[in-house]
Image: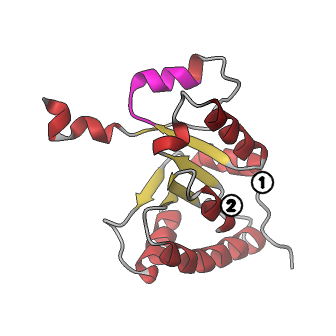
């Protein structure tokens, strides 16, 4: 029986088709069953589940076991390309996310610190390994940096997360 193979071109096409990642974090689920069911329902609704790496790794691993089986079945039996995105990816958990079989890596924090040349090189390397790389930005200037610069790295998509701008401290 054929097995699921990560395919950057198919993943990119499916991401462009679906277009929306729905974040699942610790504030949304508290058990493996809730995480797996929520991710499956997001997929069935036509979106991409983005599973936060802020969830306990054991919960993510247990849920991914079932989600990988669903993805395998859907890709072989129904030719559906189920995308699984890891959110809140940082240098300390990127290897865990890769090992769990995520197709899309959404990075926050120091995964996208632009002053470090090694970070841009790491993002480029993840793309070369076949992952869809989506840096999270918080300001329009960061979006412009990725779109108009000559850093020799173009993200597959950009997640704009202005959450910090809506805090009471930012309003002052």
| Quarter containing the C terminus | top left
Magenta residue check for 144: yes
Describe residue 159's horizontal placement relative to residue 17 as left or right.
left
Q: Which residues are magenta?
A: 137-146
- The majority secondary structure of the magenta stretch comes to helix
Q: What residue is rendered at 66% in x and 35% in y?
A: 118
Q: Point out which mark residue 81 bears.
A: 2
Magenta residue check for 70: no
Q: What residue is rendered at 68% in x and 41% in y?
A: 122
Q: Residue furthest right?
A: 1
Q: Which residue is mark 1?
A: 7
Looking at the image, tell me whether mark 2 or mark 1 is earlier in sequence order. 1
Q: What residue is rendered at 46% in x and 77% in y?
A: 37
In front: 110, or 160?
110
In front: 85, or 77?
85
Q: Is the residue 57 above or below the residue 23 in the image?
A: below
Q: Position of residue 114 (x, y in %)?
A: 54, 29
Q: Position of residue 170 (x, y in %)?
A: 20, 33
Q: Is residue 97 visible?
A: yes
Closer mark to the observer between disc 2 and disc 1:
1
């Amino acid at each position: 029986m054929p097995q699921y193979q990560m395919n950057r071109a198919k993943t990119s096409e499916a991401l462009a088709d679906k277009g929306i990642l729905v974040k699942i974090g610790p504030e949304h689920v508290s058990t493996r069953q809730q995480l797996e069911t929520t991710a499956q329902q997001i997929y069935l609704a036509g979106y991409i589940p983005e599973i936060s790496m802020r969830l306990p790794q054991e919960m993510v691993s247990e849920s991914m076991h079932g989600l990988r089986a669903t993805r395998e079945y859907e890709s072989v039996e129904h030719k559906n390309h189920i995308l699984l995105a890891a959110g809140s990816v940082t240098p300390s958990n990127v290897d865990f996310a890769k090992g769990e079989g995520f197709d899309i890596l959404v990075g926050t924090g120091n995964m996208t610190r632009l002053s470090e040349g090694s970070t841009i090189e790491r993002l480029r390397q993840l793309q070369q390994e076949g992952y869809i790389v989506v840096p999270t930005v918080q300001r329009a200037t960061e979006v412009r940096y990725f779109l108009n610069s000559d850093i020799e790295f173009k993200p597959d998509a950009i997640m704009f997360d202005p959450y910090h701008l809506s805090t009471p401290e930012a309003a002052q």
